[in-house]
Amino acid sequence: MITDMQLVFLILAITTICFLVPRFRADLVATIALLSLLLTGLITVPEAFAGFSNSVVIMVAALFIVGEGVFQSGLAQKAGDLLVKKTKNSEWKLTIFMLILVAVLSGFISNTGTVAILLPVVVSLCRQMQLHPGKLLIPLAFASSMGGALTLIGTAPNLIASQSLHDAGYGALSFFSFTSIGFIMLLAGILYLWVFGRKMLDKPLENKTGSSTKFDAAELVDQYGITENIFAVKAPNDSRIIGQTIKDLRLPSTYEITVLEVIKIETTSSLSRITRRNQTHRITVGPNYMVETGDVFIVYGEEGALTELIEDTDLILQKEKDYKLEEGHLAEVILTPQSRLINQSLKEVNFRQKYGLTVLALKHQFSEPRKGTEEETLLYGDSILVHGKWKDINLLSAEKNDTVVLKSAAEETDLANQTNRSMIAGIILLGMLLAMVLEIVPAVVSVVVAAVLMILTGCVRQTDQAYQSINWQTVILIACMLPMATALENTGGVTFMSEGLIQSLGAVGPIAVLAGLYAITSLFSQFISNTATAVLLFPVAILTAEQMGVSPIPMVMAVAFSSSMAFATPVATPPNAMVMAAGKYTFLDFVRVGVPLQIIIALIAILLLPMFYPF
């Protein structure tokens, strides 16, 4: 008959396999694993749901709200603006300053959110400097992971490491416990990425990209292959459609044609009434717009459908080259790895109704762009070309958990995100950090107070937005995986793994065991959540150290560093996955650049941890 320990390992093995399958959500897998442990009697009801009251889980959720306040107040955007000002068309300055900036920001707020803020900035700067964005985006992602390991709150594994040591009776780690070694790792990483990483990622500019020094709507339309699908038609003075609304014309359902913009031509006179001239202005068309005499419509559809429309109506095809899409109405969008839009069709998510934007085309990873239809399913790694009002584009860009607006003229003119709350957000963030460093109150209290202040001061504009900013997948994952560690401890699984490490490496010494823990963690974190990996291995690290009669602190910190420093695959961390589509990377690009960096960081950790935190 199968023993309790074997049953736990069986559930753990199945859970790990499910984590590796992209179609299964990590939080759902963790929840099912939790229920499996509970229903098989391996853990009690209080043990099963103890994770949801764990201070680390509460702190992680509150940190997402603090980060949202930093983003919404414009404080993070000011950091991006600083990057633009300091680079001055110098590749050296851009690379080094970008790496330092993203690392510092990631030490205090979500590395995924930091990358979401800086990704469009870096792409825009690459375009201005005639650089392929692929040369800098992997370094951007890697620096965010290294920066997250600088402080106690930079990444979830660091927080869980501190809590694990505290629960085991060894005291919590301080705010800057990780900083000294993390800083050395960051310096080594920056040196490696500048000297070697850039060269391995040095790609030639494509014919259709990077050719202009500013946002170019025509270039973007050409990239997505829809130039031949944009037409201009005019409603003549005696047209029978004058007075009808766009909704009444039913163009999408009848002809599969979408009206995007209307160009209105108005005649103005000078004060002397001697000279008269025509002026034009554009309007993004909504369903209730009423057709007026002389309107010129920019429409999107197939040429055959347009011919049929002209035959059925009295619209006149315009040949002038000036009738192009307005730059401020276009944007290129990529989906984040944890986007709620993934595996849903445009119709299912009501994309046009929800965001007020029209999907002109989309590009699946490693595929050619194609026209977006209502039935098209959005996939991981997709990039999308959308059209609409710039205020709607900026509203879409605010949903950083789902999308990142990669290219947009609106991003240069939008001031709505730059509020006068940035100074308040900075003061709240600084106060939270000081309270944690000086240990005035418990860390979880500092973070929760900061989160509430972000809402009360308007840095997070609405309470609903505060809830939406929380990455519930991460929260649920941590809360549901903590009982897995409890089950391993209750059934002797932790002891079994610890004894295996000691028997295989213990004779060589504690450094060899530390290296073994680092290697095991590093391997797992390339393919499954670094948080889940850390939760499972922290108890093993502590018990192994206890059985060897040495301090568990370096062992636990080795697991924390290793779980955060995952560079070798695009699925290892959310930032890695975010830059894959934007940089047009392949899986091999991450292997070539990431594996050497993984080895360098591992050597630094194995050599320095016993020096800074002796056994």
Image (spheres, rainbow, N blue to C red):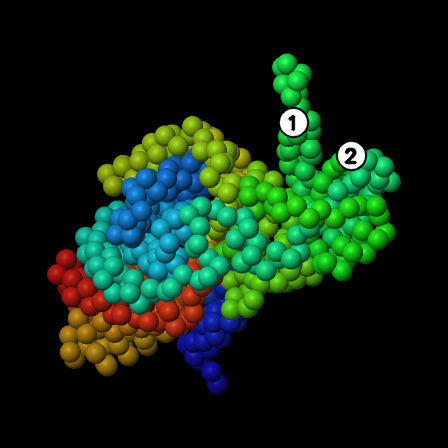
Q: Is residue 486 shown to the viewer in this render?
A: no
How far separated are the C-alphas under marks 2 and 1? Answer: 20 Å
Image x and y of residue 517, in percent: 27, 71
Quarter of the image for residue 519 reads bottom left
Marks counted in the figure total 2
Image x and y of residue 545, in percent: 22, 67
Residue at horizontal 66%, vertical 30%?
Answer: 278
Image x and y of residue 252, in percent: 76, 52
The residue under label 2 is which amino acid type? Glu
Image x and y of residue 133, in percent: 39, 57
Label 2 Cα neighbours within 10 Å, binned few <14 / some 14-19 / many ≥20: some
Does residue 478 sit above or below 434 in this rendering? below
**Is label 2 in contact with label 1 (beta carbons under 8 Å)?**
no
Position of residue 334 in the picture relative to residue 565 (left or right): right
Q: Can you identify the residue that label 2 sits on?
A: 292
Q: Toward the viewer: 85 or 531?
A: 85
Residue at horizontal 47%, vertical 83%?
Answer: 2
Position of residue 273 in the picture relative to residue 253 (left or right): left
Does residue 236 sit above or below 500 in this rendering? above
SS assignment at label 2: loop
Does residue 287 sit above or below 381 in this rendering? above
The residue under label 1 is which amino acid type? Arg
Q: Toward the viewer: 223 or 532?
A: 223
Query: Among all residues in the image, which is located at the extreme front?
Result: 274
Residue at horizontal 19%, vertical 53%?
Answer: 180
Q: Can you identify the residue that label 1 sits on?
A: 277
Q: Toward the viewer: 271 or 254?
A: 271
